[in-house]
Image (spheres, rainbow, N blue to C red):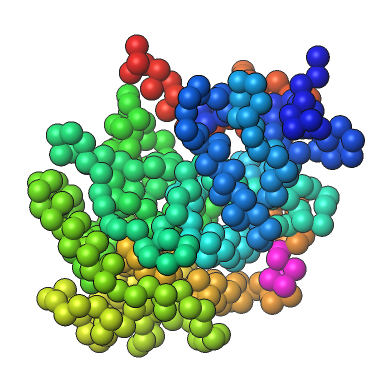
Amino acid sequence: MDVTFGGKYRLEEEIANGGCGAVFLGVHTVAGKEVAIKLEPAVPHALTSPLKQESKVYKSLMGGPGVPWIMYSGKQGDYNVLVIDLLGPSLEDLFKRCNRHFSLKTVLLLADQLISRLEFIHSRSFVHRDVKPANFVMGLPHTATSHLVNVIDFGLARRYRDPLTSEHVAWRRDRGEGGERRHGVGTSLFASLNAHRGIECSRRDDLESLAYMLIYFVRGTLPWRKIRADTVAGTWDAIYEAKVHALGALSATNPLCLDDSDGETESDSEASSDVDQATTHTTAAAEHSVPLSHRYTPRKPRASSIHPTGTPHAHRCLRTPSSAYPSSSNTYSPSTRTTRRAQAVSAPCPLTAALPREFHTLLAYARSLRFSDLPDYAGLRDMFRTLGARAGVTDAVYAREGRGDMDWECGRARCLPSNGNNTPGSYNGVQTRGRSARVCEACNAAAVSAGKQEQ
């Protein structure tokens, strides 16, 4: 018996699954167009659900570059349903096909598009909060958009500012009942250090996760990739310790913070909850007292504020002038700020020691941003394009967005070998009809852990 959603989308085979829901291939019964159908069990009497929230984000973002169109969303029977464009393989799938390594040229072409995707999402007052290779997918092969990087899975996305007043959300940090550190949201492998510390995510955290992603592509792995513990919380804590060690001096307090809210060291993270609550109150008051509209006003094209060699220019990067802040002991002069940024960029970092300097600069820059700062997206793109020019990537390649120049398009991709669990036409044990079905292992692990706790 055929199952149809929205009156015209017929359910076909499963193409991905996990604790966050399942994604199926669907076909329009009239036009014959293939779509992706995401299903989530509906909880009775629930006011909202992750899939309903995700559909709201899609409706706010669709039509933008690299964002799928939503065709249908609603509840049918025992399921919440979301129907969107069918897209191609994820960057994680392609990374595995390329023997877990991308060339520098491919990474730079991807970085150019990925920075633009985050810039668009942030311009619509959202932060993704789960930036990872599996959530960026290419267009369908052999189509006009096969080279285009698309961003998906907005189940954890949240507004970081009011879209009408541009008022930024207040800084806050979650703690457990005993005052212990409580990790945030996202995927532990690519989560920012602030997310590990339970601090509310903002634009800087998406940028830091992007830095880990690009480093992952260039290095082929991350030092903490295979760290596991008996519980999800234990895994987050173990990976956090590994990140602190790998980042070296960059893992300490944000070098450029002008307020005490996010300028916390590791020892500060273990401080009493009373001190933390007092700090949060001060930060929220200071943020609300600052007019935010001028922070997001587009500026004319200008030289990058991040020099390719890692030495910043003498001016600030799209930051609020010091005069806009109330006078306090935490306010630094522009010259002091420039000096501290130079210290941040030059801070040693074992994670990026053998990589081109630009990757260290991106990570250091993301770590230096304050909670409400607007990143210099254009400067970051210019920085990586300058590196691309030295690596032989021409403007013509950027103009066609890397069409035909990616590793998987140049014959470097390989077929995934079969193992004991995989047979032809299956992937990770999920049977398909000639397609690779993706399994969200992180979601499955979280679901299993939650089930054990309930028992």
Is residue 444 something one can see in this rendering? no
The residue that appears at 65% across and 54% down in the rendered structure is 62
**Above or below, 25 relative to 301:** above
Residue 356 falls left or right of residue 197: right
Is residue 386 something one can see in this rendering? yes
Residue 423 falls left or right of residue 123: right
**Above or below, 349 relative to 90:** below
Residue 200 drawn in magenta: no
Q: What span is colored magenta in the figure?
A: 397-402
Query: Which sits in the foreground, 427 or 354?
Result: 427
Quadrant position of the N terminus in the picture: top right
- Where in the figure is residue 448, as x and y percent of width and height? 43, 20
Quadrant for residue 366, please give it.
bottom left
Query: Which sits in the foreground, 241 or 68?
Result: 68
Quadrant for residue 369, please give it.
bottom left
- Where in the figure is residue 99, as x and y percent of width and height? 61, 43
The residue that appears at 31% across and 32% down in the rendered structure is 233
The residue that appears at 22% across and 85% down in the rendered structure is 333
- Where in the figure is residue 304, as x and y percent of width and height? 48, 81
Please, which residue is most extreme toward the top here? 455
Query: Which sits in the foreground, 15 or 273?
Result: 273
Residue 118 falls left or right of residue 429: left
- Where in the figure is residue 161, as x and y percent of width and height? 41, 60
Query: Which sits in the foreground, 181 or 351?
Result: 181
Quadrant position of the C terminus in the picture: top left
Quadrant for residue 249, please give it.
bottom left
The residue that appears at 13% across and 55% down in the rendered structure is 278
Residue 399 drawn in magenta: yes
